[in-house]
Image: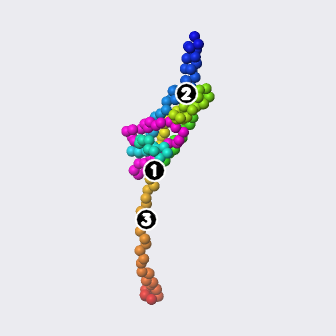
Amino acid sequence: MKKIVGAAAAVVLLNGCASITDGTSQSIIISMDPKEARCVASREGVELGTVTRSQQTLTVGKGARDIILLCKAQGHEDKTLRLVSKTQAAGVVGGIFLDLGIVDMMTGAMWKYPESVNVVLDPAAATVPAAPAPVASAPAATVAVQDGAATKP
């Protein structure tokens, strides 16, 4: 009987552990405008993957460090976004009741990034060609009028 109660208590407590309930990786859906945009994700200088129109899901390992998205599309301004992870309840509960959160912190499971991100790139500023330089012209001739007749000075 004591074994059954002990096993049941362990199962209840382990349900709070983020490593078990939520895993150590997650998928982030990234929608982009314009559709031809391409985003490269990196964390601490290490490339994690590329997102395009045909591949809009990025699967990453969870962690406390931010993910940087650098997005580009021809005819549009580049955009950099920072995806910030936040602690999740299962990690906090596991930290209080189980192992002080050591496992969840080591595996990154106590952290979670946004589930979806919408990236909108601004059109590139139109480059207006410079106006041509004014052409220097000779000074206009002056004409003097005397008694109704025009004469040149």
How far apart are labels 2 and 3 at the CA level?
64 Å
Quarter where residue 94 is shown: top right
Q: What residue span does the magenta drawing correspond to?
A: 52-77
Residue identifier under label 3? 130
In this orientation, which residue lies closer to the viewer: 125 or 38? 38
How far apart are labels 1 and 3 at the CA level?
25 Å
Q: Position of residue 125 (x, y in %)?
A: 45, 55
Query: Mark 1 belongs to which amino acid?
Result: Asp
Residue identifier under label 2? 17
Q: Position of residue 83 (x, y in %)?
A: 51, 41
Query: Mark 2 belongs to which amino acid?
Result: Cys
Q: Residue at x 39, y 45 (%)?
A: 36
Q: Position of residue 130 (x, y in %)?
A: 43, 65
How far apart are labels 2 and 1 at the CA level?
39 Å
In this orientation, which residue lies closer to the viewer: 50 or 102? 102
Q: Earlier in the sequence, mark 2 or mark 3?
A: 2
Q: Earlier in the sequence, mark 1 or mark 3?
A: 1
Q: Is residue 70 left or right of residue 87?
A: left
Q: Quadrant of the C terminus?
A: bottom left
Task: Single out the residue that lies furthest toward the top.
Answer: 1
Task: Single out the residue that lies furthest toward the right.
Answer: 96
Describe the element under mark 1 as helix, strand or loop: loop
Depicted 98 relative to depicted 56: above or below: above
Q: Residue at x 55, y 20 (%)?
A: 11
Q: Is residue 133 magenta?
A: no
In this orientation, which residue lies closer to the viewer: 103 or 77? 103
Query: Mark 3 belongs to which amino acid?
Result: Ala
